[in-house]
Image: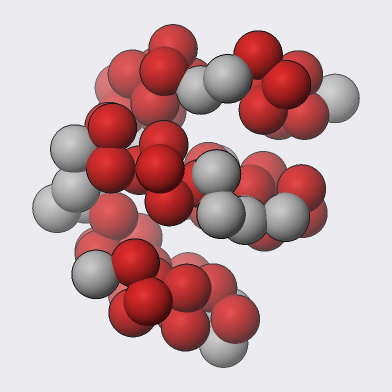
Amino acid sequence: MNSDALQLVESKNYKELKKHLLGWSPTEIVEFLSQLDERDLGIVFRLLPTHLAAEVFAELETNQQKLLLE
């Protein structure tokens, strides 16, 4: 699951990645985001619909939240 999503990030296939992420729980997305560097974290987070992004943001660690707000 995560390895497929990581490959989509590396290949910049964001349309397919978004479809992939929509089938995940907020907790699974948080775990995935924790594997990404700062740049990719912001890109992938912005792919999420607002309601899901809010749930994911609430579960992120404080340092990850700060990165997204910068």
Q: Is residue 26 left or right of residue 10?
A: left
Q: Name the quarter where the C terminus is drawn.
A: top right
The outermost residue toward the right is 70
Task: Please provide percent x and percent y for residue 24.
Answer: 19, 48
Q: Nearer the viewer, residue 6 or 52?
A: 6
Q: Name the quarter where the N terminus is drawn.
A: bottom left
Task: Please provide percent x and percent y for residue 47.
Answer: 47, 49
Query: Quadrant location of residue 61?
Result: top right
Task: Please provide percent x and percent y for residue 19.
Answer: 25, 64
Q: Is residue 59 visible?
A: yes
The residue drawn where x is 34% and y is 67% is 2
Q: Nearer the viewer, residue 12 or 7?
A: 7
Q: Nearer the viewer, residue 49 or 59?
A: 59
The outermost residue toward the left is 23
The residue drawn where x is 47% and y is 73% is 6
Task: Classify 43 as above or below 17.
Answer: above
Marker count (numbered): 0
Task: Please provide percent x and percent y for residue 64.
Answer: 67, 28
Task: Classify 56 as above or below 5.
Answer: above
The outermost residue toward the bottom is 11
Q: Is residue 69 visible?
A: no
